[in-house]
Amino acid sequence: MRGLLKILIKMNWTSIYLKTSDLNVFILGTGEVATRRANKFLDHGANVRLAGNNLSSELEDNGAQLFSTRNVDELVEWCDVAIIASGDKEMSEYVSGLAGDKLINRADYPLKGNVIVPTSFNIGEIEISIFTKGKSPLMARQLRKKIQSVITEEDILKIELQSYARSKLKEVTENQKQRRKYLYMIFEDETISDLICNGKIDEVKKYIDNLIKGIE
């Protein structure tokens, strides 16, 4: 039992999603890792500035800005999130110290920062992230392939239909336990599963509507 408690105490990272629209993100470095980080934040609406030697045309087209490493003090002051993705160890440590209590992601030494940017991917509108605590990026990619191979189009449709059912249920009852009971009933309904398998989404929605009418 004591051994288990020690393991739990060490696991002091909590997965959380951060709203990044209009967030100011400074990235030290312009290499492959820095570019991947920049694209991730740009795709989710952040303002991104990088310090380094050059910027890819893709990043320029997406709105990223390039600055000299001489401007790191101003860039750290400007940013909400600082990302270190540079091979310059001295500069990396300087920026890390300068960032202080700001959100900081260390691509070089992940556990030295306080924010992790995990391996993530989308299947439909579902985003899945994998974090190995920096132990094995290779295994993170392998796990990603395994997960992608088992999640089906039917699973994605079920998620969308659960969302549809939740919104409909909220219109007819404020009782959360009752809504949950109906959501489980819908999830386990064989008729709904058969209709989904046959791609009859409109019929599924009508069927769900009729089930929900029983609450009124």
Image (spheres, rainbow, N blue to C red):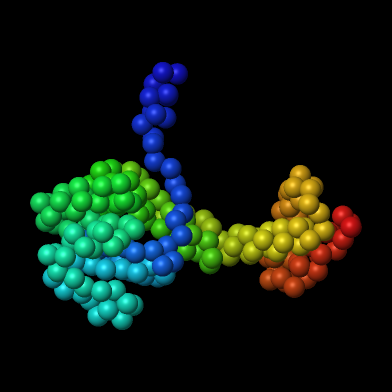
Q: Residue at x 41, y 58 (%)?
A: 120
Left or right: 212 in relation to 18: right
Which percent across, then down, holds residue 59?
28, 75
Q: Residue at x 24, y 58 (%)?
A: 76
Q: Residue at x 56, y 61 (%)?
A: 152
Which percent across, then down, holds residue 87?
14, 57
Residue reaching furthest to the top: 2
Q: Quadrant of residue 62?
A: bottom left
Which percent across, then down, holds residue 148?
47, 59
Which percent across, then down, holds residue 189?
77, 54
Left or right: 120 in relation to 66: right
Query: From the image, which quarter does the C terminus lie in?
Result: bottom right
**Residue 42, placed above or below residue 166:** below
Left or right: 159 in relation to 89: right
For the question of whether residue 14 can be seen, the reply is yes
Query: From the image, which quarter does the N terminus lie in?
Result: top left
Q: Residue at x 20, y 47 (%)?
A: 97
For the question of whether residue 31 can be seen, the reply is no
Q: Quadrant of residue 45?
A: bottom left
**Residue 188, placed above or below residue 61:** above
Q: Nearer the viewer, residue 76 or 89?
A: 76
- Give the total of numbered labels: 0
Q: Nearer the viewer, residue 136 or 63?
A: 63
